[in-house]
Image (tube, helix red, strand yellow):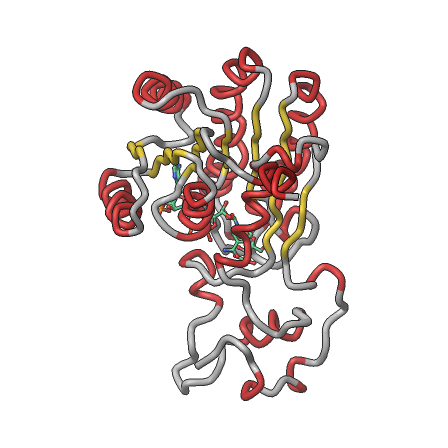
Amino acid sequence: MQDFLKNFSLEGKIAWVTGASYGLGLAYAVAFAESGARVVFNDINQELVDKGMAEYKKLGIDAFGAVCDVTKEDQVQNFVADVEKNVGTIDILVNNAGIIKRIPMIDMTVDQWQQVIDVDLTGPFICSKAVLPAMIKKGSGKIINACSMMSEFGRETVSAYAAAKGGLKMLTRNICSEYGQFNIQCNAIGPGYIATPQTAPLREKQPDGSMHPFDRFIRSKTPAQRWGKTEDLMGLAVFLASPASDFINGQVVYIDGGISAYIGQDPSNLDPSKFQDVD
Ligand code: NAP
Ligand code: GCO
């Protein structure tokens, strides 16, 4: 049985998590490090890279970090070359970096639309394209994309984000189709609503101290009546990055507390005193 558990180890692997100075990316990177991998990460500016490096050092993780904008192919190619020279060949890529703009579609400018598409969909294309040749040469590789509830559902004000995340689901399937023959698996994590800086505006208390209406709404749609924690996603990330998932390819694995399986209840029926995650 002990030999079986080795299938979940990332010992000796090099894992690149994009946009991993904080939030879900940091959680994935910590999980990989604790599972034996060497972590490399990028973020959009030096301040964030320094912030991430300090956090990894505090956790005893010897991470390699550098500035790299995932929308710029030259920066991505240089980042991958730097990692190859200073650390080694990337075995695992998590396309985590992402942005969202919550603007009604008729008010959204084409530039705002394009910014979201560039980071959330073109970025994963550019980063995957940069690591695939070495994975093919090595005869193995793992690519994990950051999909979303919006890979399946629409919602007001997030047209660009939903289009990107829906496209990312199909990019996941296409990388699987094109490179599965080289023992490369490309899957996606589909988080529900997770408490990170990206969703902080949806959880802010109202001026009168009451819950944000969206907070109450999401809890009424989640059987556990709570937001996800970044820790909730670490196990799935390690599983999809490990040999234990070698025969899973092209899949989006939803980790959403049951939102996608539940029609929901009247938000006014919720009893905040029973919430598991509110002080
Ligand atoms: P987050 O808190 O906004 O963190 C995203 C990270 O990506 C930030 O460090 C961000 O830097 C970085 N980034 C943005 N643009 C970049 C670029 N061009 N190049 C490199 N790095 C860039 O997001 P999160 O909540 O941790 O989510 C991480 C991923 O999971 C995203 O793709 C998100 O869409 C997805 N997701 C999140 C949830 C959720 O509920 N939180 C649910 C489903 C899916 P800046 O600080 O400069 O923006
Ligand atoms: C929103 C949220 C969501 C989450 C996540 C859900 O505005 O609806 O930001 O999009 O970030 O993608 O899975």
Residue 17 drawn at (x, y percent): 44, 37
Q: Quadrant of the C terminus?
A: bottom left
Q: Quadrant of ligand 2?
A: bottom right
Residue 248 drawn at (x, y percent): 71, 35
- Work out whether residue 124 or residue 277 is closer to the camera in this orientation and state it: 277
Q: Is 64 on the left or on the right of 143, as rendered? A: left
Question: Which residue is at 46% across, 84% downward?
Answer: 210
- Work out whether residue 62 or residue 216 is closer to the camera in this orientation and state it: 62
Residue 223 drawn at (x, y percent): 68, 71
Q: Quadrant of the N terminus?
A: top right
Question: Which residue is at 37% across, 18% downward?
Answer: 84
Question: Which residue is at 54% across, 58% downward?
Answer: 232
Residue 158 drawn at (x, y percent): 56, 53
Where 147 sits versus 262, above or below? above
Question: Which residue is at 41% across, 85% downward?
Answer: 209
Where 125 sits versus 37, above or below? above
Asked where in the image residue 68 lies, by quadrant, the reply is top left
Asked where in the image residue 64 lies, by quadrant, the reply is top left
